[in-house]
Every structure is written in structure tokens, then in C-alpha cells.
Amino acid sequence: MADARARTARISSAPNLLGVARILATPVVCALVLVEAPGAGIAAFVIFGIAALTDWADGWLARRRDEVSPLGVFMDLTADKVLVAGVLVAMVEVGLLPTWMVATIVVRELVISGVRQVAAAADVVIPARALGKSKTATTLVGMAVLLLAWDATTGGPLAGTGLAGSLEALGFWLMVAATALTVVSGWDYLRGALPILRGGRT
């Protein structure tokens, strides 16, 4: 049993390596967005899409291989936040998203991370809720659509399709919905964690 726990806690396990790959993909996607070169947008979309899929794959793989560990949970949550926050900041830089929207999403993630740390210190695990999962899915889809819009805007393969305006509008409103879900799900987490924050237990 001890050997199994030691094995699953290694950074070199397949699920953890997927988390590392997600982190490493973040600066690549950001750089592709910021260079504004023809074709960079579609490349950013492909890399971002693959990285986002690993968010599902690493958890599924860890459960299937019975390799769920505190390190794995940490890598999964950290990689998700690094990918989303990093690319969102790049999108603000090039004008794809307003600062207030990205700030709302990032601040929420920081607050909930703090709540999870307090809960962990009390040996309480706060599971992902339906609203939180919906927020994550909507955010990732909205960001992917905006990367396609960026490709069309910067002279990439989608430039001649005339879809730039429609993709940008769709991506923006998906992110509006994601921001609303961010606020609502954040409050849902906080409300559920109030007993812990007050010194009790859920």
C-alpha cells in the first residue's frame, strides 16, 4: 500500500505529466496570441484546445489507474488556473476581452483557492460543484471561439471566411455568460464553506 501511494504521488505519473504539459502550453498560447502573425491564431486555438482537453483527460486517467493523489489534485487545479488566467491576460493585451471581465474571473479563482486551502487545513475536501463545472466549460469554449476570431482578424486561415465579427461576438457573449457563472458559482462555494471559515465544519 505504501509503495502504491508513493508511486501515485510522483510528478512523473501520466496524469501529473498532463498537468505539467498544460502549464507549459500556457506561455506558448500567450506568445502566439501576442505576436499577431497570420496563422498564429489558429495555432493558438489548436494548442489551447488540446491543453483544455487534458483537463478532462488527467482526471479520468488518474481515476482509471487509481492514481488519485494530493499532488495530482494540486497539479490539476493549478494547471487549469495557469492556463485560463495566462491566456485571458494575453486576450486583454490584444483587446479581445475587457479588463473588468478578466479581473472578475481571476479574482474569483484566487478567492476560491484560498477557501480550498482553509478547507484543506481543516481536512475538508470541497468538491467541484455543478455551477463550477459549467463555469469552466463555458469559459474554455468562449476562449476557444475568441482564438478563432483572432485568427480571422490577424490574417490567418479564417480571414477570408468573413466570420471574424460573428466569432468575436459569439466568443464575447460566451465570456459574459462565463463571467456571470463565475460570480454565481463563487458565491455558491463561499456559502458552502462559511462554516469552515467561521471555524466550524461543513
Image (cartoon, helix red, strand yellow):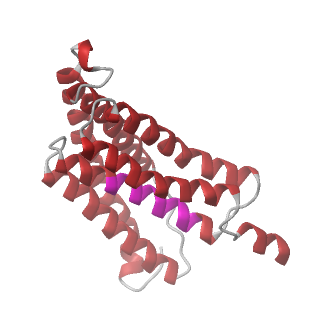
The residue sitting at 38% across, 39% down in the picture is 44
Q: Position of residue 163 (x, y in %)?
A: 23, 18
Q: How far from the left and from the top, in percent, is residue 132?
A: 40, 51
Q: In which quadrant is the N terminus drawn? A: bottom right
Read off the magenta span. 73-86
Between residue 70 and residue 92, name the one nearer to us: 92
| Left or right of residue 130, residue 102 in this image | left
Q: Quadrant of residue 162?
A: top left
> Which secondary structure class fits the magenta region best?
helix
- In the figure, residue 95 lies in which quadrant? top left
Of residue 57 and residue 111, the one placed in the foreground of this image is: 57
Residue depicted at x 40% and y 50%: 28
Q: Is residue 29 above or below residue 110?
A: above
Answer whether residue 158 is magenta in the image.
no
Residue at left offset 40%, top offset 59%: 81
Q: Using residue 116 as the reference point, say whether residue 147 is left or right of it.
A: left
Q: Nearer the viewer, residue 117 or 163?
A: 163
Does the magenta portion include 76? yes
Image spot of residue 197 (x, y percent):
37, 80
User: Residue 168, relative to residue 138: is it above or below?
Assistant: above
